[in-house]
Amino acid sequence: MNLKVNEIFYSLQGEGGRVGEASIFIRLSGCNLNCEFCDTNFVEGEMMSLDEILNAIKYYNSHWIIWTGGEPTLQLSEKVVSFFKQKGYNQAIESNGTHPIPQGIDYKVCSPKDNYPAICALNPEVDEIRLVIAKGDIIPDISSFPKAKKYYLSPIFDEIIPVQENILYCVEQVKLHPEWALSIQLHKFIGIQ
Ligand code: SF4
């Protein structure tokens, strides 16, 4: 079984409910969306077998994998999750929610972009909703999203609206809607991958 892998790196989770935790990021190639604010190069990639991926990560001290993309559910299957679970790894995923998240994932992050009813039907329950927000965006009612333990607003880092304005807007939105919390992309502030 092979996966098309864009990159593998070892760093700290920079955002959301596991912020600051050492994790092995496995970025799978390809995405089914084309968000204008996307800051990720996910097109390129090389085919790797599961054993090759295991060899690439086995010397890292953390046993937390984060499957990310692109959209990792386009390639990730229960068999892949089960393979790494048997090797002793915990696994998180960062998904746009447009495909079902495979069984066996230990920490599910859903970052929905639109079409929320379909996403709720596919993934009714996750650990974390992370909604990417720019200044002026309307925050949908929390009942629009899959049930989650935590709901985060994540200010967009882009060049159109200065990030500080997006952050301050999110701060005001969290004060207005305290069912949400603020998640800043800490890795970008401290200059790590
Ligand atoms: S879903 Fe995520 S990876 Fe895909 S285009 Fe949108 S921001 Fe980029």
Image: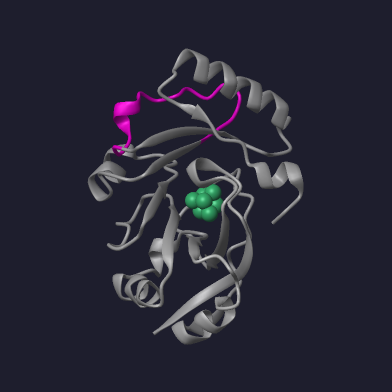
Front one among 60 and 40: 60
At horizontal 42% and vertical 49% (from top left) the residue drawn is 96
Most common secondary structure along the magenta stretch: loop
Left or right placement of residue 159 versus residue 130 in this view: right
Identify whether 6 is placed above or below 66. Answer: below
136 magenta-colored: yes
Front one among 43 and 20: 20
At horizontal 52% and vertical 59% (from top left) the residue drawn is 70
Left or right placement of residue 52 versus residue 14 in this view: left
Left or right placement of residue 119 versus residue 155 in this view: left
User: Farthest residue toward the top?
Assistant: 176
90 magenta-colored: no
Instruction: For residue 161, say whether it is visible.
Output: no
List x then y, in percent, for residue 69: 52, 60
Task: Classify residue 8 by image quadrant.
Answer: bottom right
Magenta span of residues:
132-147
How many labels sit on residues?
0
Front one among 191 and 32: 191
User: Farthest residue toward the right?
Assistant: 191
List x then y, in percent, for residue 115: 35, 40
Left or right placement of residue 85 versus residue 26 in this view: left
Identify whether 2 is placed above or below 118. Answer: below
At horizontal 46% and vertical 59% (from top left) the residue drawn is 71
